[in-house]
Structure formats: C-alpha cells, structure tokens
Image (tube, rainbow, N blue to C red):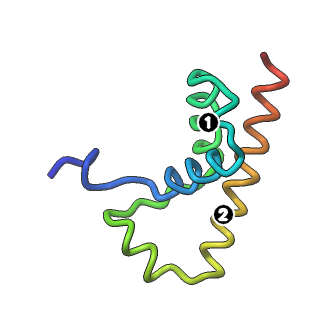
Amino acid sequence: MKLDDDIHNYYEKLLLDHIVELELDNSKDSEYLADLCCISLNLLPPRYIRYEVDMSFYLPQSERFEMQMKVKEAVSRARQFLDENK
C-alpha cells in the first residue's frame, strides 16, 4: 500500500473546489496558490478518506455544509494573511 495514492485529506478537494469557485486559479500565480493551500489546510482539521464516493454517499448534508463553511473561513483568513504580508 502506498499512502500517497490510497489515502488523502478530503479537505484538499473542498479547498481546490473553493479556489476554482473564487476563480483564484485564474487571477493568482502558482506561488500564491501553493501558499494559500498550505495555510488554509493548516487551519483545517484533517479528514482522511480512501474514496471520494464514500464521502458523497455517507456524509450527512449538514456535515458537508459545515466542512464547506470551514474551508471558506480558512481561505479567507489565509488570503488576508498573504495579502497583508506581501
């Protein structure tokens, strides 16, 4: 078993989805986005999974909403930090 292929943090997907939703992938460079991801993920609790489908079918809607709100807050805080410390 290789951990890097079999196990990942579900917050990574939610974070990337939110970055695309904000269109930051079109307006910021790769260095900024890498820093944004690192800072944001460090503000979030880990949620390790093996298969995306498990989260799709077994995660209650209320928990999914809470996770998305945590991602939005983490990205907002990370952006503020990065923009203030250029």
| Residue at left offset 56%, top offset 83% | 60
| Residue at left offset 85%, top offset 24% | 84
State the residue position of label 2: 68
Which residue is nearer to you in this view: 22 or 55?
22
Residue 61 in percent (x, y) is at: 61, 81
Q: In this rendering, would 53 be left or right of 30?
A: left
| Residue at left offset 72%, top offset 63% | 69
Residue 40 in percent (x, y) is at: 64, 42
Give the class, few, some or many, for how many residues have Cα within 10 Å of label 1's Cα (few <14, many ≥20).
some
Q: Is residue 84 placed above or below 63 in the rendered structure?
A: above
- Residue type (three-letter) at the residue carrying disc 2: Gln
Which of the numbered marks, if any, corresponds to residue 71?
Answer: none
Task: Find the distance from the CA under tag 2 to the CA under tag 1.
Answer: 18 Å
2 or 1: mark nearer the eye: 1
| Residue at left offset 66%, top offset 63% | 68
Q: In this rendering, would 41 be left or right of 22?
A: left
Which residue is nearer to you in this view: 86 or 47?
86
Residue 46 in percent (x, y) is at: 51, 55
Which image quarter holds the C terminus? top right
Residue 18 in percent (x, y) is at: 64, 52
State the residue position of label 1: 25
Q: Is residue 83 placed above or below 8 in the rendered structure?
A: above
Question: Could you say whether the residue bearing mark 1 is in a helix, strand or loop?
Answer: helix
Nearer-N-terminus badge (2/1): 1
